[in-house]
């Protein structure tokens, strides 16, 4: 599988050197390479596994190499990360194959003299795995290394959630996330889509959270999934599908989705409106707007229009015009780390501190666009209360014309959240992506 490993090294270089997202770089590489299905699966495992192990792999590497990791030749650094991932995390790959292929990769992708360094590091790791035993003296350090999470984040969660909840959350983040699809009810039903997917060889089941949702446990390449390409379905996580349920849009209304890319929630709203009315989907990036438009066209949605606009300007541009407004705010994304293997290593504590001010500014702008007697929904895919309840409470304290409506009452299936004014899903408790949803009503008059 030398070609597979070489492909994986090149993808890892894109991720770590050029800042590419792992899923995007992987998809691009797999489209451009003629690999067997077995090799495609192996490349996917190597890339996602190595990226997810991130700082833990670098800690292991520091146990065997005196050279500072940042000063290593970029290709050698990725080859060693990949090799150590195979040695410490993949039971079925022979150590000899790991060492030999890593040396050959070093000869091809780096100065040949460095192949000896690669060989020495990996063969020492094979002989002396105990060197990289995680220290048990400090629970937080051990948990961070064992669970492949940044130490600062583990410490933050221990402080806010407790040690046992943090253990459960980090364990959930390392599980395999299933593909979730939303049936496009403008063209099909969930039962019909289930049958078509199963006839195509997929293993799937109805979602227990969302009436249009399907959880696909096994499938082939997405590019070859005909129902998806034919616009009968949209990729969307189960918890994300609950947002349109809480928004509860009606045919003929005018709705604004302030931070709409890639369009999953906007197109779901259009379905619930039976493709009747008007939806404005805003975003600040041209390529993201193009993605929204592509999804709407594929799904046969005609009521959705896009606009390049900063969400903080929505209120001034559409003062008291919308029946309902959705703010799916930019957030830390700490509820969806299992779906984004590189995300946990891109976050920092400073981002968590900075986000609430931006989120509140967007929410206040969006509120101006809501008509009297209209609805404002705020959602995030994080579990951080500073970004969730605290933002909503700060907004309500400044805007007495809005009042909370019980979001849990709009959930389509009972999961213990029905009585919650603001719905907070936790991965380790609910078995789904972490998500927050609050629904606010604008009074006709004070």
Image (tube, rainbow, N blue to C red):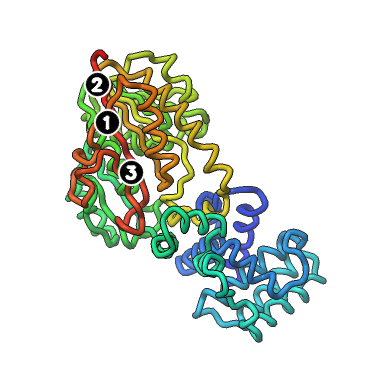
Outermost residue, right side = 113
Upstream in sequence: badge 1 or badge 2: 2
Task: Look at mark 3 in the image and give the residue it sits on.
Answer: 240
> Toward which corner of the image does residue 241 lie, by quadrant?
top left
In the rendered image, is residue 80 in sight? yes
Question: What SS does tag 1 mark?
Answer: strand
Picture coordinates of residue 347, whole percent (x, y): 55, 49
Picture coordinates of residue 82, whole percent (x, y): 61, 68
Picture coordinates of residue 404, whole percent (x, y): 27, 30
Work out whether residue 292 or residue 396 is closer to the camera in this orientation and state it. 396
Badge 1 crowding class, 10 Å Cα cut-off, few under 14, some 14 to 19, many 20 or more, is some
Upstream in sequence: badge 1 or badge 3: 3
> Toward which corner of the image does residue 136 lie, by quadrant?
bottom right
- Left-right relation of 358 to 367: right
Residue ID at (27%, 42%): 242
Upstream in sequence: badge 3 or badge 2: 3
Give the number of marks. Answer: 3
Residue ID at (39%, 23%): 398
Residue 253 tag number: 2
Question: What SS does tag 2 mark?
Answer: loop
Which quadrant of the figure contains the N terminus? bottom right
**Rendered position, 390 above or below 111:** above
Task: Look at mark 1 in the image and give the residue it sits on.
Answer: 404
Work out whether residue 388 or residue 219 is closer to the camera in this orientation and state it. 388
Picture coordinates of residue 165, whole percent (x, y): 39, 61
Question: What SS does tag 3 mark?
Answer: helix
Residue ID at (41%, 18%): 315
**Rendered position, 255 above or below 198:** above
Which one is in front in this view, the residue at disc 1 or the one at disc 3? 1
Badge 2 crowding class, 10 Å Cα cut-off, few under 14, some 14 to 19, many 20 or more, is some
- Spatial separation of the CA atoms under disc 1 and disc 2: 21 Å
């Amino acid at each position: 599988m030398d070609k597979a490993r070489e492909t994986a090294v090149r993808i890892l270089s894109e991720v770590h050197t050029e800042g590419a997202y792992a899923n995007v770089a992987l998809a691009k590489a797999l489209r451009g390479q003629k690999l067997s299905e077995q090799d495609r699966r192996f490349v996917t495992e190597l890339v996602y596994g190595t990226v997810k192990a991130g700082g833990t792999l670098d800690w292991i590497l520091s146990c065997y190499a005196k050279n500072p990791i940042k000063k290593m030749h970029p290709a050698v650094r990725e080859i060693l990360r990949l090799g150590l991932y195979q040695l410490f995390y993949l039971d079925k790959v022979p150590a000899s194959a790991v060492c030999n292929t890593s040396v050959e990769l070093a000869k091809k992708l780096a100065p040949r003299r460095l192949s000896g360094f690669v060989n020495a590091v990996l063969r020492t790791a094979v002989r002396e795995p105990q060197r990289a035993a995680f220290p048990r003296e400090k629970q937080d350090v051990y948990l961070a290394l064992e669970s492949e999470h940044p130490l600062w984040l583990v410490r933050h969660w221990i402080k806010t959630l407790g040690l046992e909840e943090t253990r459960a959350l980090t364990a959930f983040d390392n599980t395999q996330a299933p593909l979730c699809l939303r049936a496009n009810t403008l063209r099909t039903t969930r039962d019909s889509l289930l049958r078509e997917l199963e006839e195509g060889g997929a293993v799937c089941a109805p979602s227990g959270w969302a009436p249009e949702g399907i959880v696909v446990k096994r499938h082939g390449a997405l590019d070859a999934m005909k129902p998806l390409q034919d616009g009968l379905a949209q990729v969307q996580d189960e918890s994300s599908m609950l947002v349109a349920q809480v928004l509860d849009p009606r045919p003929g209304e005018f709705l604004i989705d302030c931070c709409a890319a890639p369009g999953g929630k906007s197109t779901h709203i259009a379905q619930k409106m039976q493709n009747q009315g008007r939806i404005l989907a805003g975003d600040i990036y041209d390529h993201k707007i193009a993605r929204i438009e592509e999804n709407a066209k594929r799904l046969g949605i005609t009521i959705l229009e896009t606009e390049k606009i900063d969400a903080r300007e929505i209120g001034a541009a559409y003062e008291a015009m919308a029946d309902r407004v959705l703010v799916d705010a930019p957030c830390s994304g700490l509820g969806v780390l299992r779906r984004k293997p590189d995300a946990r290593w891109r976050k920092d504590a400073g981002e968590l501190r900075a986000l609430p001010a931006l989120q509140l500014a967007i929410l206040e702008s969006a509120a101006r666009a809501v008509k009297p007697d209209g609805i404002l929904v705020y959602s995030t895919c994080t579990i951080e209360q500073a970004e969730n309840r605290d933002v909503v409470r700060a907004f309500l304290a400044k805007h007495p014309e809005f009042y909370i409506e019980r979001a849990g009452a709009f959930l389509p299936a009972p999961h213990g959240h029905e009585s919650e004014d603001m719905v907070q899903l936790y991965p380790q408790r609910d078995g789904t992506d972490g998500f927050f949803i609050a629904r606010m009503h604008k009074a006709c008059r004070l």
